Image (cartoon, grey):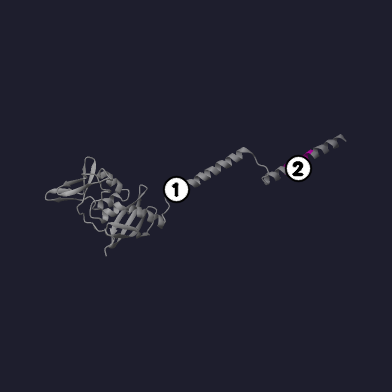
Amino acid sequence: MKKDKSKNIIIALLIIIIIILITLVVLFATDTITFNKKVDSNDKLEDTTSENTENESFNSQDTNTMLTDDEAIVILKNNYNDAVRHIFNEAVSYCGEVSTETNSSLSLNGFTYSKSASYNSFEELENYLKNYMTDTLLKSTNYNKTITIDGNTVSSYYEQNGSLYCNGWNKGGNIYLEKYNENESSFEITNITVESFNAKINAVYYDHDNTTKTIKQINVSVIKQNDKWLLNSYEEETN
């Protein structure tokens, strides 16, 4: 009898253990219970690593994202600023704002030089222009001209006592193209890439008394150089 009783107890314990094991299997299978901290920590680390990789990929892609036409037009309008228009279209050397101080002009070799209120040296002026155009394009312009007249050298610019003076003699531009109207001008963008685009500007100008309207058709190329968008070529169409 004792043997039968012990045997029954063992069988009962085994049944209880089997029930507990089956219950645990069901609970794990349904995610009702999970192992604790270590799994959570590893999962969190994997999620963070994944997010960082995605952010790096997005930032890299964003840096090299191609411009929309509207974005390219904004860049083009900015680069076709007063200095650039002045260099290509006006008759006198670009000087920025001219000083209104007394005795702010010089007379050299029969030519008048006006003192710049914007720049103290030719280097300052050049560095400003290089915010809008490449060195190659800048060097191809006629903005810094030197000629010899009756044995005297006459230049577009002259520095004296920490000031920059600009020559007012004719450099071959159109003196009547004084007023540029951005609202009436149009800008067409083509061939956009990550690092460049081409454009056509239909630039509307008026003379000094707003009576004569002139449209200049200009083809330009713009490139990205040292994280700056710069004019790289400039060509006016002739009618």
Residue positioned most to the left: 150
Q: Secondary structure at mark 1?
A: helix
Residue positioned most to the front: 102
* Mark 2, residue position: 19
The residue at 78%/38% (across/down) is 13
How crowded pointer 1 is (Cα within 10 Å; few <14, some 14-19, many 20+) is rated as few
Q: Position of residue 60 (x, y in %)?
A: 44, 48
Whether tag 2 and tag 1 are in contact, CB under 8 A, the answer is: no
Residue 20 part of the magenta-drawn span? yes
Residue 139 part of the magenta-drawn span? no
At label 1, which amino acid type do we have?
A: Ser
Span colored in magenta: 13-22
Q: Position of residue 78 (x, y in %)?
A: 35, 52
At label 2, which amino acid type do we have?
A: Ile
Q: Is residue 195 left or right of residue 44?
A: left
- The secondary structure that dominates the magenta segment is helix
Q: Position of residue 120 (x, y in %)?
A: 26, 43
Q: CA distance from mark 2 to mark 1?
A: 56 Å
Quadrant placement of the C terminus: bottom left
* Mark 1, residue position: 60
Q: Secondary structure at mark 2?
A: helix
Q: Is residue 19 left or right of residue 229?
A: right
Q: Is residue 136 left or right of residue 9?
A: left
Q: Closer to the camera, 197 or 70?
A: 70
The residue at 30%/59% (across/down) is 205
Q: Position of residue 214 (x, y in %)?
A: 28, 62
Q: Closer to the camera, 233 or 180?
A: 180
Q: Earlier in the sequence, mark 2 or mark 1?
A: 2
Q: Is residue 142 left or right of residue 20?
A: left
Quadrant placement of the N terminus: top right
